[in-house]
């Protein structure tokens, strides 16, 4: 937002036109909102509720702040970092214990 200055020599008309331009130059045109809201506050609230709720990974919905132990519907991924606290299990098969996973990571660099 631009700083607005009113001089002591400005007329009431200068003051009015200077501050009325705030809506079009500093805030933007509400007609260009891409939400269903009709004002800036409503648009921010709408976007906040969309962004703050969570996301879906595979077919698992995850709310922000949740701890997830199982992700379903994930068919592939490019790369991953897995932090196994006791053992690593894939499709109910114990793949590695934590000490073995650490040794593998050190050996493979």
Image (cartoon, rainbow, N blue to C red):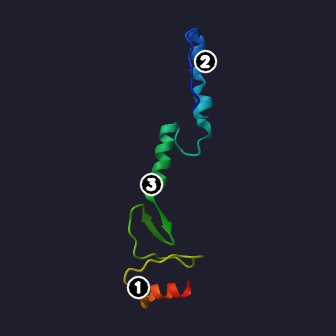
Q: Which residue is mark 3?
A: 52
Q: Earlier in the sequence, mark 1 or mark 3?
A: 3
Q: Which residue is mark 1?
A: 98
Name which residue lies at 59% across and 42% down: 33
Name which residue lies at 50% across and 69% down: 57
Look at the numbered disc 2 and give the secondary structure of its residue.
helix
What is the C-alpha distance between the residues marked 3 and 2? 38 Å
Look at the numbered disc 1 and give the secondary structure of its residue.
helix
What is the C-alpha distance between the residues marked 1 and 3? 34 Å
> How many residues crowd around disc 2 within 10 Å: few (fewer than 14), some, or many (20 or more)?
few
In the displayed structure image, the side of residue 61 where residue 75 appears, left or right: right
Q: Nearer the viewer, residue 44 or 94?
A: 94
Above or below for 3 versus 104: above
Q: Earlier in the sequence, mark 3 or mark 2?
A: 2
> How many residues crowd around disc 1 within 10 Å: few (fewer than 14), some, or many (20 or more)?
some
In the displayed structure image, the side of residue 22 where residue 64 appears, left or right: left
Q: Which residue is mark 2?
A: 17
């Amino acid at each position: 937002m631009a700083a607005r200055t009113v001089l002591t020599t400005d007329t009431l008309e200068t003051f009015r036109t200077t501050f009325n331009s705030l809506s079009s130059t500093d805030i933007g045109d509400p007609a260009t909102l891409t939400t269903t809201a009709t004002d800036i506050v409503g648009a921010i609230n709408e976007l906040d509720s969309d962004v703050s709720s969570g996301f879906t990974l595979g077919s698992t919905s995850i709310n922000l702040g949740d701890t997830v132990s199982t992700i379903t519907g994930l068919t592939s991924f490019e790369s991953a970092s897995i932090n196994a606290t006791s053992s690593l299990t894939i499709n109910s098969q114990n793949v590695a214990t934590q000490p073995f996973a650490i040794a593998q990571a050190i050996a493979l660099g």
